[in-house]
Image (spheres, rainbow, N blue to C red):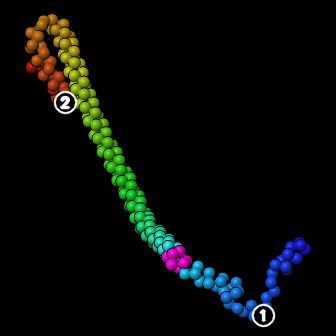
Amino acid sequence: MNMLSILLQEHTEPMGAEALFDPWSNVSFWTLIIFVLLLFVLRKYAYPPILGYAAAREQRIQESLDDAQRQREEAAVLLATQRRELAEGQREAQAVIAEGKLAAERIRQELLERTRQEQEEVIARAKQEIERERASAVESVRHEAVELAIAAAAKLLGQRLTADEDRRLVSEYLGRVESGKTGAGVA
């Protein structure tokens, strides 16, 4: 290191006070000239594209911000619309469910009423059938009673009338018995 400092001292010329302030011999003058020239070149050729790029970027950022704000507002409107539609859909679903319950209750009532009517019809038909069977049984018993009475009377009398006449006499007698008019004799 000592050697370097010695070499530097030998090759440098001593400057005097007057050389220090001389603008043409000083490095600061040339530095100032180069700075002004560089500033002019930068201002003429480099700053406009840089400023244009910065302005374009600023505009893109502002457009993106505006677009984001617009999309946020649209999303808020769509969200509110969707919430209204969802609420409306829920109300409609509740109405459909309530209507379905009413329809089901109405159908249940109709089915119960139809079942009651069918039961009453079955009971009425059964009663009619029972009455017919009873009447048939009574007629059959009456017929058997007539036959037995004719047979008994024929044996008692020892003679036999005609079958049609026998039946007529017994039927008249039984008719009087049923009506409560029992006669002492048969005419």
Q: Residues within 10 Å of mark 2 (few under 14, many from 20)?
A: few
As drawn, 81 above or below 155: below
SS type, badge 2:
loop
Residue 97 lies in magenta, yes or no? no
Q: Residues within 10 Å of mark 1 (few under 14, many from 20)?
A: few
**Between 24 and 175, the one nearer to me in the picture:** 24
Q: Are marks 2 and 1 in contact (CB under 8 Å)?
A: no
Asked if residue 92 lies left or right of residue 2, the reply is left
Q: Which residues are magenta?
A: 41-48
Q: Give the percent coordinates (x, y) of residue 73.
A: 44, 70
Query: Which residue type does callout 1 highlight?
Result: Ala
The mark found on residue 112 in the picture is none
Residue 45 lies in magenta, yes or no? yes
Query: Which residue type does callout 2 highlight?
Result: Gly
Which residue does the image show at 70% across and 84% down from the upper left? 27
Q: Give the percent coordinates (x, y) of residue 123.
A: 29, 34
- Which one is earlier in the sequence, the residue at label 2 or at label 1? 1
For label 2, the residue is 180
Q: Could you tell me if residue 4 is visible in this image?
A: yes
How many numbered circles does the render carry? 2
For label 1, the residue is 17
Which residue does the image show at 19% across and 30% down from the upper left? 180
**Between 185 and 39, the one nearer to me in the picture:** 39
Q: Give the percent coordinates (x, y) of residue 1.
A: 89, 72
Which residue does the image show at 33% across and 49% down from the upper left? 103
Q: CA distance from mark 2 to mark 1?
A: 175 Å
